[in-house]
Image (cartoon, helix red, strand yellow):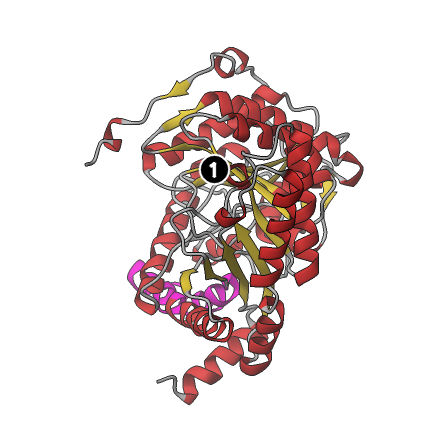
Amino acid sequence: MINIFEVNETNKMIEQENLDVRTITLGISLMDCIDSDLETLNKKVYDKITTVAKDLVKTGKDIENKYGIPIVNKRISITPMALIGGAACRTPEDYVTLAKTLDNAAKTVGVNFIGGYSALVSKGMTTSDELLIRSIPQALACTDRVCSSINVGSTKCGINMDAVKLMGEIVHETAEYTKENDSIGCAKLVVFCNAPDDNPFMAGAFHGVTEADAIINVGVSGPGVVKVALEKVRGENFEVLCETIKKTAFKITRVGQLVAQEASKRLGIPFGIIDLSLAPTPAIGDSVAGILEEIGLEYAGAPGTTAALALLNDQVKKGGVMASSYVGGLSGAFIPVSEDQGMIDAVEAGALSLEKLEAMTCVCSVGLDMIAIPGDTKETTISGIIADEMAIGMINQKTTAVRLIPVIGKGVGERVEFGGLLGYAPIMPVNQYSCDAFVNRGGRIPAPIHSFKN
């Protein structure tokens, strides 16, 4: 039973410490929509999404009103579209019609984003996969709410370097297609290694083929709550520090569990997982970098940053799994630049570089996220950065991802404004030495020896 003390404590977290449920994400299988006729396929996709998700936004608002818990986003994830469109799509432009259908469906039901304009190509690309990938720049330029993700590697399969090379080109092309809006299309495109089937967070959410016909996944957040808790134990040893983070993560996850179960009951759709990631926002006090500074660093990026982040990530997971039996998705600490005021400050102070962020991704929950780079960065350089991040995920048996934004027409020292949850970002310098010969080799980097666990 939740007692009155817990109720008051939770209210304080919401009112003063930026606690929120970041998203309720409804996963929908579109496998039963597959059709060889493109027009029929588009109709089936639109009808299924608008039928299954028709009450999602209203339900989220009703739960907000009942419990006083802010639910920032209501989202949809779908089966990777490359699997659904293969029988009907013959050109990239055919896939763009599906992207427009997804966008229209998202607007009809009122969700913030729809994820799953995706392909899973960790070992190879089908014709359908390649057509979808080549359609991404146009698809993201002509839609508002569609998010795209491509999984190019895994611990079991290795890294598909042909796909990595192609994605360097696609990221740059997407930036060009949306250059009038500071290349914001790239903010809706992420490249994965070991992408999970049940991630509720955008831009990487898709509904895995192992999932049920429909499922409710919830992503909670609360870096501000953790920071406030740590302020009360300043100067204490690591044991006290870890226990404080763990107990706070438990409380945050309990809020998510409550929302998830209520949404599942009201919608008549099974509950999937709670993703207990600490996802920052540009709001003051709602920063993962702020937690790292409270642990004892002058800025994120100072010596000790990777160790502090590893500690934080581990304790968040330990606290979360005690609060819910169904923890999944990404679950840990996000370290985006543009969405985290503390990270922005660290970059502008010269404390945090792209290379240090890469080192931090070895121990955080995702990877190089929402990082603005010069618009004239070479496509092969983008591919090289993607390859490095995929290797970290493959070797360490964890999810890693890259969401880079080459801002066309801007360079190091300038700022780019995205607005809303995406915030703003300083454009970071990129290593100028060439990796052309490496990226252009083609083929696959084989799976590591520890992948053979059967």
Residue 89 visible in the picture: yes
Residue 404's image quarter? top right
> Which residue is farthest left?
454
Q: Describe residue 143's horizontal placement relative to residue 382 as left or right.
A: right
Q: Quadrant of the N terminus?
A: bottom left
> Which residue is farthest bottom?
4
Residue 445's image quarter? top left
Please state which of residues 293 and 396 is positioned toward the viewer in this rendering: 396
Please state which of residues 230 and 280 is positioned toward the viewer in this rendering: 280
Q: Position of residue 13 (x, y in %)?
A: 51, 74
Badge 1 marks a residue whose secondary structure is strand
Q: Describe residue 96's horizontal placement relative to residue 75 as left or right.
A: right
Which residue appears at 42% of the width and 82% of the height?
6
Residue 351 visible in the picture: no
Q: Position of residue 257 (x, y in %)?
A: 42, 70
Which residue appears at 43% of the width and 89% of the height?
4
To which residue does mark 1 refer?
192
* Within-10-Å neighbours for mark 1: few <14, some 14–19, many 20+: many
Q: Is residue 227 magenta?
A: yes
For the stretch drawn in magenta, the main secondary structure is: helix
Please state which of residues 241 and 54 is positioned toward the viewer in this rendering: 54
Residue 399's image quarter? top left
Q: Which residues are magenta?
A: 222-249
- Of the residues shown, which amino acid type is indicated by label 1? Phe
Q: Position of residue 27 (x, y in %)?
A: 50, 56
Number of numbered discs visible in the structure rendering: 1
Q: Describe residue 33's horizontal placement relative to residue 265 as left or right.
A: right
